[in-house]
Image: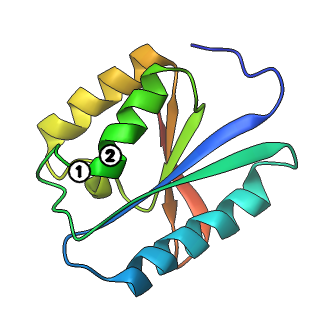
């Protein structure tokens, strides 16, 4: 796993199956709130959002950029409201967990209602 030396590069990934800019904004604001409380002071946030793209397909523009940025070492951590935003099935989640682990990227699942970090998986 990559050692984080300076600025933490966090990717916020949001997804909705039906076009809903309000729902995407709600996810981004909720995750940003958790990050502000938990990540300390030295971090850079990148936003990735697939508005109107089903999570069952890998063919989502922002998701593809997220995968490339993870492989390229551009991001250290991915924050989502739920793993289902990345992959809706257990096998899909396991595949992504292996991929992100190989890239040295940590995935954190944030629960918006409570505003707390609920799960970390690499």
The structure's colour scheme is rainbow
Q: Residue at x 66, y 50 (%)?
A: 45
Quadrant in which the N terminus is drawn: top right
Helix, strand, or loop for circle 1?
loop
Work out whether 55 lies above or below 98.
below
Q: Are marks 1 and 2 in contact (CB under 8 Å)?
A: yes
Find residue 90 and report its horizontal and vertical position in percent: 16, 42
Left or right: 89 as drawn, with respect to 9: left
Q: Using the rendered image of the protein, determine whether residue 47 is visible from the camera's viewpoint.
A: yes
Q: Residue at x 39, y 81 (%)?
A: 21
Look at 33% across and 22% down and name the residue there: 99
Position of residue 79 relative to residue 92, above or below, is: below
Tell me if 101 is positioned left or right of 88 in this view: right
* Residue 6 disc label: none
Q: Is residue 98 above or below residue 54?
A: above
Mark 2 nearby-residue class (10 Å; few <14, some 14–19, many ≥20)? many
**Residue 114: x, y in percent?**
57, 75
Residue at the disc numbered 2: 63
Taking 120 as reference, is 92 left or right? Answer: left
Q: Which of the pair 67/108 is nearer the observer?
A: 67
- Residue 60 is marked as 1
In the image, taking residue 87 as reference, residue 10 lies left or right, namely: right
At label 1, counting other C-alpha atoms closer than 10 Å, the crowd grade (few under 14, some 14-19, many 20 or more) is some
Relative image position of residue 4 (x, y in whole percent): 73, 22
In this view, which residue lies farthest toward the bottom?
22
Q: CA distance from mark 1 to mark 2?
A: 5 Å
Q: Secondary structure at mark 2?
A: helix
Taking the image as drawn, is residue 122 in sight?
no
Residue 118 position within the rendered picture, expressed as x and y whole percent measured from the top left: 52, 55
């Amino acid at each position: 796993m990559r050692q984080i030396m300076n600025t933490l590069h966090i990717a916020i990934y949001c997804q909705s199956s039906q076009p809903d800019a309000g729902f995407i904004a709600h996810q981004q604001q909720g995750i940003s709130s958790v990050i502000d409380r938990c990540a300390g002071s030295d971090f850079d946030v990148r936003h990735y959002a697939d508005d109107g793209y089903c999570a069952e397909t890998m063919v989502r523009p922002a998701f593809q950029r997220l995968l490339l940025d993870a492989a390229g070492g551009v991001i250290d951590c991915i924050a989502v409201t739920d793993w289902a935003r990345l992959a809706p099935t257990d096998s899909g989640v396991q595949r992504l967990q292996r991929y992100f682990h190989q890239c040295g990227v940590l995935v954190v699942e944030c629960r918006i209602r409570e505003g707390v970090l609920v799960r970390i998986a690499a």
